[in-house]
Amino acid sequence: MMKSKGSPFKFVVIITLVVIALIVALVVINNQNSESKKGKTFDKQPSIEGQPTLGDPKAPVTVVEFGDFKCPSCKMWGENIFPQLVSDYVETGKVKFSFINVLFHGEESKLASLAAESVYKQNPDIYWEFHKALFNKQPSENHDISWVTIDKILELASGVSGIDTDKLKADIESNSEINGVNKDTEMVTEFGVQFTPTIMVNGTMIEDPFDYDSIKKAIENALEEN
């Protein structure tokens, strides 16, 4: 006997194929969403006006780090990638480098950022020494412990020549530099920063911040466009 055109078997096969197609589509969409910001080029680059910036202000290429003083990966990036970037491009006048605060670790990130903003306002020339001291203070292990406190910050600041620790303490306690921190948070949202460190070369977000070859390639491409 011949099967009818409305065979249940045929119906099951069609439904199965539809379900598989939907699953594949969802996987693709999820992957696209999770990767959408990585390696993306924006119509504009993050504004570094009023931000701590290292290098020649007239350098043709801008590299921005979205970083968090509580982030272990940011400390690692600063130790392993940043010095090479400075040697190859900042000191040669090709790149200016700027740091934008990210508060992914809550109140301690905010406290460290407020302190850094205050030091920058006091004296931009000593900002980077304090910046490095903050990251050096980050524990090598057990990163979840609380270590960013006003006392620890003042202790660090006392070891950096040129910082008025009394003013720094007053600034932190009064949240006097909160506008600078909030400005950074707005840029984190604007550029869809989802992980730290996030590195941008002009308007291009680097997919893997620890892939120095990718950073170099983006810089060289930007130099060619200038």
Image: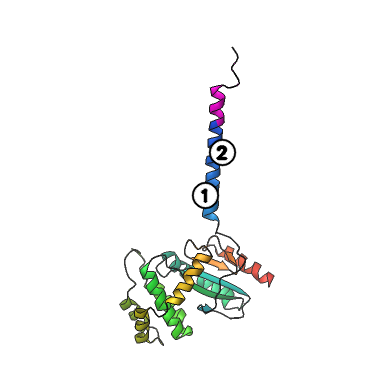
* Residue 136 shows in this picture: no
Q: Position of residue 33 (x, y in %)?
A: 53, 53
Q: Residues within 10 Å of mark 1 (few under 14, many from 20)?
A: few
Q: Residue tagged by mark 2? A: 21
Q: Residue furthest top?
A: 1
Q: CA distance from mark 2 to mark 1?
A: 14 Å
Say if residue 218 shows up in the picture: yes
Q: Quadrant of the C terminus?
A: bottom right
Locate residue 139: give its quadrant.
Answer: bottom left
Among the two numbered marks 2 and 1 on one chain, the one whose residue lies closer to the N terminus: 2
Residue type at mark 1 is: Asn
Q: Is residue 7 magenta?
A: yes
Residue under label 1:
30
Please, which colouring scheme is shown? rainbow
Residue 143: percent from left, percent from top: 35, 64
> Which residue sits furthest front?
6
For residue 39, which quarter of the picture?
A: bottom right
Residue under the image location 54 percent in, 31 percent down = 15
Q: Is residue 184 left or right of residue 222?
A: left
Q: Which residues are magenta?
A: 1-14
Label 1's element? helix
Kind of residue at badge 2: Ala
Quadrant the N terminus occupies: top right
